[in-house]
Image: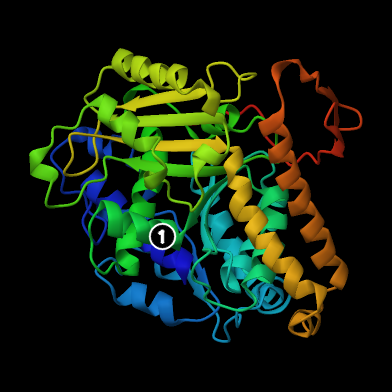
Amino acid sequence: QCGNQIGLEFWENIVQEHGIDNEGFYHGSNPIQIERANVYFSEARGGRHVPRVVAVDLEPGVLDGIRASALGKLFRPESMVSANSGAGNNWAKGFYTEGAELLDRVLDIVRHDVEACDLLSGFQICHSIGGGTGSGMGSLMLQKIREEYPDRMLSTFTVMPSAAVSDTVVEPYNSVLTLHHLIENADMTFCLDNEALSRICLDVLKIKSPVHKDLNTLVAKVMSGVTTSLRFPGQLNADMRKLAVNMVPFPRLHFLMSGLAPLTSAATVGYRQVTVPDLCQQMYGPQNMLVNCDPRHGRYLTCAAMFRGRVSVKECEDTVLGYADKHSSSFIEWIPNSTQIAVCDVPPAGMDIAATFLGNNTAIQEPLHRIVDQFSRIFRRKAFIHWFTDEGMDEMEFTEAESNINDLVNEYQQYQDAAVDDGMLYDEETAAYEGDAGDYDEQAAYGAQDVVIE
């Protein structure tokens, strides 16, 4: 449900930016809009643009809602695949039973879309990890796509459980099992959570009672910001692979936090002239992060800033480097020049300039630690575990997943504390880091090859 609703909001954003109407026909006035529309759309008969998308759910309700929405005629009917039973908030149902039955149909549609591409860059998956379908079937699809397309980028937009509100009691189980697969199979994971999104809507945008559509709009803006350089010409380009190469210093440490600027309430928009320093100040601010963890509690391994609109590249570089110098304690000193900058000439609809921020910050261990702590409390008593073992799961899978995430949290902490002269060595044969902080195993989960991306 979550992934499909975020996806729908994303497509609403994309068709607006490319001047395409709700049935897939171009009505824009600027040739730049349609020049690279083939990144996300394939062209059908009569100049109709059909999104390259597969919408999957184990219950039909949400997909029926999408078919009946204003964008319902935009999507190819067979690209929406649903079962009737639902996953019942059970990861094992999504991964082993109900999801596995649906998987072949989904992979056939993925292959069909891949074959229609001139040059496949990679995949984007939107899902949440607290329920059953997004977590269980999401993990299964990640695994199968990684097996079938090992050299293509796999990025996920992952809605994590929030600290304040829990939708389901077995959320820690579903989340830990999914994170285990994300560590191994994803190249980049953009972490989001409803609490942070709600906080932005309430405190920054001054929306009195935000609904899910308001939250999804924020996520859609980040998704379109990340892919801007693929879709529009710019002065400094960054595609998915360039982004991953610059953002992920070690294969397991690919959990990124994202931010947006400018974020202002509708009442104050007319009273401000947004400048590049304003964008920089806002996008690094903890109140603009779309995941509920404070970047000031950790340090940045790497960052990426994607500016949109008519801005000077030199001004962007100077501002970002000036911020990094001024707040040098917030950045790992053994990765110099750790911020990647991309500039695209086309601003988002209704804005002059905007920026999307991505950060690989060691503070992301906070939500991970919180989830695994909740997991440990329930798992110690073996509560609810029979629902998972009845679907064919083994208890060992829980233990493996828990230790994998604990290892990840320790790795983040270790790099946060590491100084330039710690003398950490990477032994390629054993794939283990040896340093003053102790030895630990590093499981390679990267399948990147040299690929030219459109």
For disc 1, the neighbor class at 10 Å (few under 14, some 14 to 19, many from 20) is many
Q: In x, y percent, where is residue 300?
A: 55, 31
Farthest residue, direction left: 270
Pick the residue in front: 235 or 420. 420
Residue flagged by tag 1: what amino acid is it?
A: Gly
Q: Is residue 242 visible?
A: no
Residue at figure coordinates x 22%, y 57% from the top left: 206
Q: Is residue 332 above or below residue 355?
A: above
Instruction: State the residue position of label 1.
Output: 7
Q: Quadrant of residue 172?
A: bottom right
- What residue lies at 62% left-to-right and 66% top-to-bottom? 135
- Nearest to the observer: residue 257 or residue 30: 257
Relative depth, front residue between 150 and 191: 191
Q: How is the image coloured?
A: rainbow
Q: Residue furthest right?
A: 430
- Snapshot quadrant of residue 153: top right
Left or right position of 436 against 123: right
On the rendered structure, is 35 left or right of 42? left
Task: Using the rendered image of the protein, determine whether residue 192 is visible from the camera's viewpoint.
Answer: yes
> What element does badge 1 sit on?
helix
From what the image shows, is residue 183 above or below residue 59?
A: above
Task: Indicate the position of residue 377 as horizontal and vertical percent values.
Answer: 74, 71
Q: Position of residue 169 (x, y in %)?
A: 61, 79
Q: Residue at x 73, y 46 (%)?
A: 408
Image label count? 1
Report the side of 252 relative to 83 (left or right).
Answer: right
Give residue 20's position: percent from left, percent from top. Answer: 23, 51
82 relative to 338, above or below:
below
297 relative position to 145: left or right: left
